[in-house]
Amino acid sequence: MGVIDGAPSSGAGHEPDPAHRAAPPEPILQTSSGDETNHDDLLPEDATAVGSRTAGPDRNSARWPALRAVLANLPLLLLALLANLVLIPLLGWGLATLFALPAAGFVALVMVASSPGGPFGAKLSMVQKGDVVAGTAMQVLLAAVASLTFGPTSTAILTMAKVGQGISLDVAALVRTVAILQLVPFAVGLVMRHHAPSTALSWHPAAGVVSNVTFMMVLAGMLLGSRTLLAGFLLSVVAFAVGTLLATGPPTRRTTMGGIAAVRNVGPPLAAVGIAFGDEQAVLGALAAVLVSGLAAALPIAAVLGHRRQGDTA
């Protein structure tokens, strides 16, 4: 007798039948509620994000919710639009008047101030170890919106300032040019990143090098001596402060918005110079001076912030 449910009793001298020995437990983890769960489900969110850096499709799927969360932050969006589309253009007008810039410098500073969404702003968010996702999303949004607002804004300011009399920007031609040069390549890249992530990632290093080299070539070709350097430098510094103050969230996100505000988009001003000013060399030189001095101001600020944050996490 002494057998319960087919297993020998625990009396002395009786060894359990090997056929009835308990099988080793399956390597399944359980939550505190007793439910079975997969190992991957227990990974912290940060670990999943780190792992996604090496996987194309996972990386895209991880980024989309973060981008949507940034673009759904209404206070952040409204403050960024106010700073970049209203206050900084007015700041450019004020600095141009304060320094009594010549017509070419005045026009260049106003156009740069009226053109937010410079791509290098997203790189500044990496340099300062800020909120890269928020910075990239805001840079793209501002560039898209500014393709519509740049023409009316800069024309209105120049008209009220009575500078560049008789100059009227062809808004339709300007929007068409910006769309071809900026929005179409961006859309193509976005589609490739979504449908062919491995190909997009393999092209990324070469595309980055080409982008940086051509940008520097354009600036070098345009650069002429101009006394608008100081005005461009101050525009970038004050824009960094305005963008930081008019932002919500933690310090990393606020300073990221500052970097986005400090770096303006060269595309629309270059298109405007070609359309309305006949590629006039004085305006091109002043435009290059404003852009270079602005980068010279914003990059060290971002580098200092990044160095401090690296020291805090060490």
Image: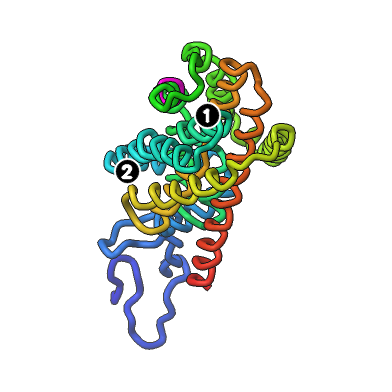
Q: Which residue is mark 1?
A: 107
Q: Nearer the viewer, residue 237 or 15?
A: 237
Q: Which residue is mark 2?
A: 76
User: Does residue 202 appear anywhere in the picture?
Assistant: no
The image position of residue 106, as x and y in percent, is 52, 32
Q: Nearer the viewer, residue 24 or 224?
A: 224
Residue at x 45% of width, y 67% of height: 24
Range of residues picked out in magenta: 150-154
**Does dot 2 land on a helix, a strand or a loop?**
helix
**Does dot 1 land on a helix, a strand or a loop?**
helix
Residue at x 30% of width, y 72% of height: 3
Q: Nearer the viewer, residue 122 or 244?
A: 244
Q: What distance separates the C-alpha of mark 1 from that of mark 2? A: 30 Å
Quarter of the image that includes the N terminus? bottom left
- The kind of residue tagged 2 is Leu
Task: List the single residue furthest toward the bottom.
Answer: 12
Q: Which secondary structure class fits the magenta region best? A: helix
Residue at x 36% of width, y 40% of height: 83
Is the image coloured rainbow, by chain, by secondary structure, or in one colour? Answer: rainbow
Q: As drawn, is 250 to the left or to the right of 162? A: left
Q: Classify 10 Å Cα crowding around label 2: few (below 14), some (14-19), many (20 and above).
A: many
The image position of residue 268, as x and y in percent, is 54, 25
Please tell me whether residue 289 is drawn above or below residue 309 in the rendered image. above
Write down the quadrant of residue 108 in the picture. Answer: top right
- The kind of residue tagged 1 is Val
The image position of residue 182, as x and y in percent, is 56, 25
